[in-house]
Amino acid sequence: MSNTNADEIAAFMNELEENRPAKATGGRRGATYDILKPEFGKIYRNYAILSFNHGTSPLGADSVVVRMVNMDTGRREKIYLQSYEIQDWDRFVKNNEIVTVETTEDGDKKNYNLPVLCDFLKQKEESQKNPGRFYKSFNAIARGAVSRDDLPEYHEDQAPPAEE
């Protein structure tokens, strides 16, 4: 590479760096959630589902993370669902119209009808096809919609950083 070309590249990179928007400072942008590991066979009541998304765990397994507020304590909590629990979750979302699809001129648009109050239960159930084998299931009952204004305030240790 000639010196002229190297100088042009250096000048180009300097100009590029000067024109870039400032990098965001600080770490997280949103609220901090406690990880809830639900006990099998225990009913968890009065939770407001805030959001969820499908993803892949670091080990490569499909999973769904569900972000909720415990309406009794005000704590933001999240649970992870895997394997058959994902099918149960998807069925819950569909049956309760938590996500609806609206067809527009620009294509289909998903509407998320959240937050939703619910009670939920995780269980180990015995397979009917293979007695003696168990699988995990996720069961939930939607108790109705809740306004974001009706959600408890953030606990100090979970609040998103203040806007500057």
Image (cartoon, helix red, strand yellow):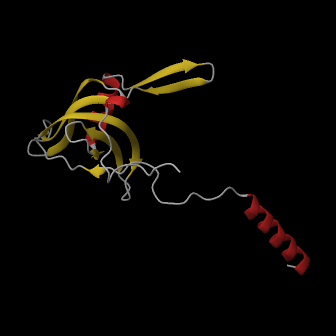
The N terminus sits in image quarter:
bottom right
- Residue 74 position, x and y percent, is 25, 41
Residue nearest the viewer, comparing 42 with 153 = 153
In the current view of this chain or complex, which residue is farthest to the front?
164
Q: Residue at x 26, y 45 (%)?
A: 75
Q: Residue furthest left?
A: 132
| Up-down relation of residue 115 to residue 76 (above or below) | above
* x and y, in percent, of residue 6 in the image: 84, 76
Name the quadrant containing residue 94: top left
Picture quadrant of residue 112: top left
Is residue 11 visible in this depiction of the protein?
A: yes
Q: Is residue 131 left or right of residue 23?
A: left
Residue 156, percent from left and from top: 32, 51
Q: Quadrant of residue 119?
A: top left
Q: Residue furthest right?
A: 4
Camera-side residue of 154 and 66: 154
Give the number of callouts: 0
Residue 82 visible (yes or no): no
Left or right placement of residue 14 versus residue 55 in this view: right
Which one is nearer the viewer's eye here, 46 or 95?
A: 46
- 154 to 21, vertically: above or below: above
Residue that appears at 34% across and 45% down: 65
- Image point 13% across, 46% down: which residue? 133
Measured as percent of width and height from the top left, residue 43 is found at 13, 37
Q: Residue at x 18, y 44 (%)?
A: 135
